[in-house]
Image: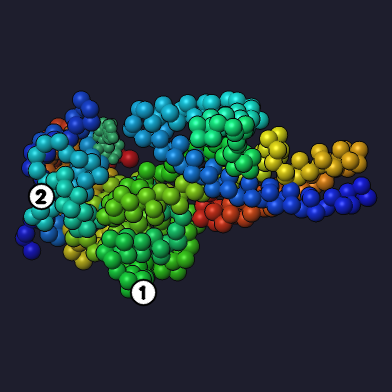
Amino acid sequence: MEAVDGWWDDYFWGSMIVLQVFFFSLILMVIFGLIGAAAKLSDNVVAQKIAGAYTIIFRGTPEILVILLLYFGSAITLTAIVQIFSPDTKFVDVPPLWAGTIAIALIVGSYATETFRGAFLGVKEGSIEAARALGMSDLQTFIYVRIPEMWRLALPPFGNHMLSLIKDTALISIIGLNETFFVAKQAIGTTGEPFTMYIVVGGIYLAFSSIVTLSVMGMEKFGARTGEGAR
Amino acid sequence: MTDTLIKMQNVDKFFGDFQALKNINLEVKRGERIVICGPSGSGKSTLIRCINRLEKHNNGHIFIAGKELTDQVKDIDAVRREVGMVFQSFNLFPHMTIVKNLMLAQRLVRKIKKPEAHKTAMHFLERVKIAEQADKYPVQLSGGQQQRVAIARALCMKPEIILFDEPTSALDPEMINEVLEVMTDLAKEGMTMICVTHEMGFARSVADRIIFMDEGEIVEEAVPEEFFDNPKNERTKQFLSQILTH
Ligand SMILES: Nc1ncnc2c1ncn2[C@@H]1O[C@H](COP(=O)(O)OP(=O)(O)OP(=O)(O)O)[C@@H](O)[C@H]1O
Ligand SMILES: [Mg+2]
């Protein structure tokens, strides 16, 4: 393991990037998932179609391809726009961190769309009717009954989505994001010890995913206390 | 004590092409206890669900405490404040403790402050003899206990009338009585009730009037003695002979 000496700080900063990507992609993933689910459940046929296309496209193409297409697609577009104002420009890109974050949020968000849709439909109509019969408004029913019950149903698959996000950050190295995987490749270039370097990356990802798994388990336990959450 | 709380005039209800209620006329006075019975699919649930607008009637008029039930949200809200409902499957909020189940609508709908809502909740939990379960979650309670909680939840809103839709038919036999007892107590205290049930013992001892429905119509309406001992309509006789033999 001496080969790793001198690389720990790089791995540390790489880990921070993983965390950063995870954090922002998690927020975006929830937003995309909720919008997707709302669109699928809406009466608007156009919205339904768009959401349908979204889930088919993003669940049906390799993730690495989505990242590459999004990165280069946005770079080409951006470059073309910038060239209008300064024709000498060669290449402008969306920073890999953001292109990658958005890409994996879109990918996992397409799965989350189905999760949220299913959870929404899984809430028992009885609770909703009881709330209405008690005189609660639609908005109050949504906030105090629908959302909390939906959340318990969505939590187990949602934990898997978070794991996907963590693991997908490794893919962003392909567009030059200097996260741990990227660090490992550089380290291998100078030390010639691929196994050691990749083992470190494995350890880091395992640590992250364990934290996610444990916190989801904790939340599920909290939900199970109230009954059907652990179904 | 003779003022009319509920008045249904020529009410029709359609589900698509299917007519679930046919020209329903019904008047319920303050303090009256009505039992509705009839075969499955005869429209009993639909009738009481029209009263608090869980279903929307297509023709005719429904008045609750003098106010007509229209499409206006404010009318619907006003009606729902007067009308409590107890469902066959309890429908407690599974993610909340028992006492929170009782406090939620008080706070959101009646805008009652937390301490007072809590006090009211505990008062009614005591009345249904279940105060010691206040901090449990619905799944931790038996069906009979959950149904008593559901009754207490409706009472917390201080309704003028309570609708019961087969409150005991999802219960194990040994739990039916504890719920019927609570309902009988309510009746004695003068609560106006409309109760869909096939508990004929309860109907006989508590109801002021029994209504028999079949195929979306009110077929027969009578005081209990007359209804059981001297039914007029053939369909009622047939129904009673079926239900009383087991
Ligand atoms: N939402 C709905 N959509 C379509 N048809 C419905 C709907 N609700 C009820 N119906 C139909 O209306 C008729 C009356 O239903 P309702 O539930 O009022 O009967 P019920 O007398 O309460 O029967 P049960 O004893 O089985 O509860 C039934 O034929 C039922 O299939
Ligand atoms: Mg029914």
Q: Is residue B103 left or right of residue A103?
A: left
Chain letter behind tag 1:
B
Please tell me how crowded label 2 is: few (under 14), some (14-19), or many (20+) other residues with Cα within 10 Å. Answer: some
Asked if one can make out residue A70 in the rendered structure from this viewpoint, the answer is no
Q: Is residue A22 left or right of residue A33?
A: right
Quadrant containing ligand 1:
top left
Q: Which mark is residue B68?
A: 2
- A82, A176: nearer the viewer: A82
Residue B94: give x, y in percent of width and height. 45, 53
Residue positioned 93% across, 50% down in the render: A2
Of B157 and A198, the residue lying toward us = A198
Q: Secondary structure at mark 1?
A: helix
- Up/down of B91 relative to A54, above or below: below
**What type is the residue that disc 2 sits on?**
Glu
Discs 1 and 2 carry the same chain letter: yes
Q: Residue at x 29, y 54 (%)?
A: A136
- What's the CA distance linking mark 1 and mark 2? 34 Å
Quarter of the picture containing the C terminus of chain A is: top right
| Identity of the residue drawn at 40% across and 48% down | A146
Q: Amino acid at mark 1?
A: Pro
Disc 1: CA contacts within 10 A as few (<14), some (14-19) or many (>=20): few
Which residue is denoted by mark 1 in the rendering? B115
Asked whether A198 or B104 is in front, the reply is A198
The disc at residue A46 is none
Q: Identify the residue shown where x is 59% and y is 33%.
A: A89
